[in-house]
Image (cartoon, rainbow, N blue to C red):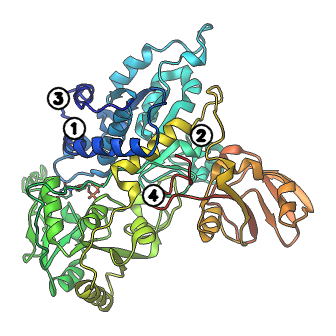
Amino acid sequence: DVQLDLDDLMKTLVDPNERGSYAWIRRRIRGMWPRWTTAVKELGKKQDLGKRRKKKILVHLGLLSKQSGWKFAENQFKGGPLGELVQWSDLITTLYILGHDLTITSETEQLANILSQLPAANSPCQSRKELPVQIIYTDIVGLRQFKKHVKGGYGKFSCLLRIVDSFGTEPAYNHRPYARAHKILTSWGGNDLLPQQFYTMFPHSPDNSFMGFVVERHLNTSKSKNIERKNIAVVYGKNEYMWQGKEKYIEEIHKKLEVHGTTYIDNSTKPNPKKGTTPKPVHPIPNYVVNHGLLTAEDFHVLLRQAKVFVGLGFPYEGPAPLEAIANGAVFLNVKFHPPHSSKNTAFFKGKPTSRELTSQHPYIEQFIGPPYSYTVDINNMGEVEAVLNKVLNQSSKFESYMPYEYTEEGMLQRMNAYIEHQNYCQFQKRKSKWPPSSAVTYFLAEQGLDCKEACWKQNLICEPGHFLELNSAEKFSKFGKTCAQEEYVGDIFYPAIDDKNKDCYFQKEEILFSCVGKRDYLKRLCPCRNYIKTQTALCQGCD
Ligand code: UDP
């Protein structure tokens, strides 16, 4: 059953050391708890949450470990990246409130300790049903630590893994031999899991599972009530470097609005040991900007409620803050990328296991939300910036807030509960039935040159990689009036597909290479597409 008492979770989330690793996570969970309990009760009215088995779940936050070297814990209150901590906080809350039995670790010693209690991989009387955990959530750093410590038992546990992977891992980068052969193998990829075992922060390639997070809201608190919207723009940039090179753009906004920032200023410049001098800090923030410094979540939201626009600077990519701005009624100015940013041309994405191309700072908002809540602008074209500002400031819609269901507490609970109940990557765990069910899936022969993500989206459907296997035969092509002249089995990300010119058909040889995002100019792909619930894109209709 569901768990409505927070105390046990707080006892589970005890810092493993003096670094205060869980401080930010604990604070977020505590602050949002009342909303979570309301949400789970609401969901319980819509669907039966009673008949579920309690699962044993291990959550290992590799990003917080000393070995990661990332200093997430050290920078959580100093403008460091918070998107990942947001996602982990919400995942932990979801699992707990849905009633599961959690073990949470973030240091390798803790993990090693737990894994040492596991039965040896070759123990004869150890059947897989007796595994001490049923699901393991970790990240790629955690996965490396896991592999090292579980040693021979990895094969047995790999199907229990769910990898929290904010930017996603495409099949081509995941399959180690393929990635190596195509020279795209990096330290993030080559894990040879099923692509759906990677859980992303936004719905990227449908090859991965979309996990998401919750967009925080502070409605009806004493501070946030009766706030008047003023002629204010808030700039989206927690660190000074994000402002660099954006002077003209900010100046254009300043012509019409008072500009505010919430940027952490680091005044602790280190002495230069060689010359014995201290370098002069560079402050790229114009003097006219009212900088509040990094605010607490609630104060940040109060500021957003006073603002008319929230101004993107092009970095960070796909953070939570723009969705919070829109939820508070501020219009988000999304930075257009032309050409798109990807691992081919952008340092940040180098080595990330995806060839996804970002057409703006926040593609989710561009694709799924758009005007009047957000406009995507070329920030080097001042005419365009001015026109968009005029549109926003003169708009008749009165800075209404918008919040997609999939980013609410209830939406996340519904989605994750469906995953926990239905997703199954282990052959030895009995599948109740195929999920998502065939009734939600339609097959299409894509237009030449399109991948399945694009082909399905054109039909207002979503590529469903779990149903590729049924399509992998010549008989399926005949349903579309195509007779194969030749049939060939190849391990590559484009298949099943037909070369319409010579009628050669290609089928998939490697199951984990089935992909929604592979395409070739000369190929027509066969695609499984499923329907979805509007603003809950991860689920098909009736699949909760
Ligand atoms: N945030 C905050 N105070 C501020 C600015 C931002 O608490 O002054 C919060 C914001 O509410 C959001 C989180 O920081 O939930 C992450 O923000 P961002 O979109 O910048 O993503 P990141 O780059 O940290 O992943």
In the image, 535 versus 50, the foreground residue is: 50
The tag earlier along the polypeptide, 1 or 2, is 1
Label 2 CA crowd tier, 10 Å (few <14, some 14–19, many 20+): some
> Badges 3 and 1: C-beta atoms under 8 Å apart?
no
- Marks 3 and 1 sit apart, C-alpha to C-alpha, by 15 Å
Q: Secondary structure at mark 1?
A: helix
Report x, y in % for residue 263: 15, 62
Location of residue 65 in the rendering, given as x and y in whole percent from the top left corner: 31, 34
Q: Is residue 228 visible?
A: yes
Q: CB at mark 1 closer than 8 A to ligand 1?
A: no
For badge 1, the amino acid type reads Arg
- In the rendered image, the quadrant that contains the N terminus is top left
Give the SS element for disc 4.
loop
Quarter containing ligand 1? bottom left
Q: Earlier in the sequence, mark 3 or mark 1?
A: 3
Residue at the (88%, 69%) spot, across then down:
502
56 lies above or below 65: above
Q: Earlier in the sequence, mark 3 or mark 2?
A: 3
Q: Are marks 4 and 2 in contact (CB under 8 Å)?
A: no
Marks 4 and 2, the one that precedes in the sequence: 2
Q: 10 Å neighbourhood of mark 3: few (<14), some, or many (≥20)?
A: few
Kind of residue indicated by mark 2: Asp
Tell me the residue that label 1 is attached to: 26
Q: Are marks 4 and 1 in contact (CB under 8 Å)?
A: no
Q: Could you classify mark 4 by the number of other residues whose Cα lies within 10 Å: few (under 14), some (14-19), or many (20 or more)?
A: some
Which amino acid type corresponds to the residue marked 4 in the rendered image?
Lys
Q: Which residue is mark 2?
A: 192
The answer to which image quadrant residue 518 occupies is bottom right
User: What residue would you read off at disc 3?
Assistant: 18
Marks 4 and 3, how far apart at CA: 34 Å
Q: Which mark is residue 350?
A: 4
Indicate left or right for 139 with 174 as reference.
Answer: left
